[in-house]
Amino acid sequence: MSRFWRAGWVGLLGWIVAAGSTGWAEIREAGVWWLPRNVSHFGHEIDFMIYVILWLTGITGILVFSTMIYFIVKYRHRAGVGAIHSHGNNTLEVVWTTIPVFIFLALAIYGNEMWGRMRMQKPPADALQVAVVGEQFGWNVRYPGPDGKLGKMDSHKIGKDNPFGIDPNDPDGKDDFTTYNELVFPVGHPVQLHLGSKDVIHAFYVPEFRLYQDMVPGRVYDFVWFKADSTGHFQLACNQLCGQGHYKMFGKLSVVPEEEYQAWAKGKAPATIASSAPMPANTSVANR
């Protein structure tokens, strides 16, 4: 057996093992041949646009290829039959140019309005504030303490010993707590993210949330927010090639009922702080 065929069989065997492993199911709860289930209140509009584009391109593709096949068969080479020379049709040219122009304009206008609602619309006042800072190769997560206020992030202060760029004199950050590669959110409650990067470009990516945001060092992105409509366990992945360990940069993200969320938050809080002040309904704390 040649070296080429041996390499092919080894690659095929590796693919079969990977496809049958439990790790495959951990990444996607649904099948890999269609969109993952949507759990975000913004996701319905995104899925609607995807379906519209899919139907438009699918119908157009069927019409174009059907026409091509028809012309290939009808005007195939036959002995004794001369070729027909066509110089085009101006009316048809105008029609099949104008229709796509209006379709693209409609998609662009709708997409721009949808993007504005996702990124420009302010989150509700009771949104849970959560800071997430990417680093090679993991996710630093910060929750507000019993006061319900998250310490303010300053991109210029982000560094090795201060991944969140928190001012040590900021009173709002005194009781904040952190986790690493672990996020827990209450279902049906708005969450506002404060995203940053400690070293290189990372990307906050959760397919089930229809949420993607690049994180460039030197900036803090505080306009990203969402509300999960259903519970589940998901994976926070970095969608930028951020180095040799990029493949292992993922975090566990869970959306749980409010009661379970409160129990998780209180269990993560240090006993000295958990007993000194009550836990607000929209506050989560955790230890790293």
Image: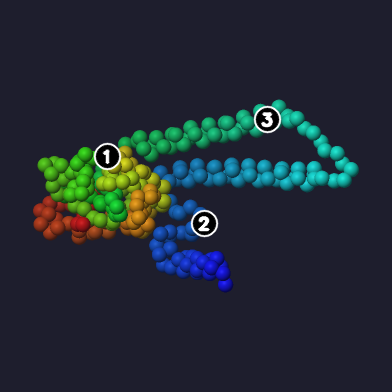
Give the residue pinned by disc 3: 93
Q: Secondary structure at mark 1?
A: loop
- The relative height of residue 147 versus residue 87 in the rendered view (above or below) is below
Q: Residues within 10 Å of mark 1 (few under 14, many from 20)?
A: some
Q: How far apart, in angstroms, are the residues tagged by discs 2 and 3?
A: 37 Å
Residue 32 appears in the rendering: yes
Three-letter amino acid code at disc 2?
Trp
Q: Which-is-in-front pick, marks 2 and 3?
A: 3
Give SS at disc 3: helix
Instruction: Tell me where residue 259 appears, x and y as whole percent.
Output: 26, 57
Residue 5 vs residue 44, the one in the foreground = 5
**Residue placed under numbered mark 2 in the picture:** 33
Q: Looking at numbered disc 3 in the image, what kind of residue is underneath it?
A: Glu
* Cβ–Cβ under 8 Å for marks 2 and 3: no
- SS label for mark 2: loop
Residue at mark 1: 218
**Residue drawn at (23%, 59%) of the image:** 263
Measured along the vertical axis of the image, is residue 5 above or below residue 237? below
x, y percent for residue 23: 40, 64
Other residues around mark 2 within 10 Å, as few (<14) / some (14–19) / many (≥20): few
**On the rendered image, what quadrant is the C terminus found in?**
bottom left
Q: Residue furthest bottom?
A: 1
Q: Position of residue 282 (x, y in %)?
A: 24, 48
Q: Mark 3: few, some, or many residues within 10 Å (few <14, many ≥20)?
A: few
Earlier in the chain: of badge 1 and badge 3, it is 3
Q: Which mark is residue 8?
A: none
Q: Is residue 94 left or right of residue 33?
A: right
Q: Is residue 249 left or right of residue 102?
A: left
Residue that appears at 54% across and 34% down = 104
Tell me if I can see residue 172 in this picture.
no
Name the kind of residue labelled 1 in the image. Answer: Gly
Q: Position of residue 96 (x, y in %)?
A: 65, 33
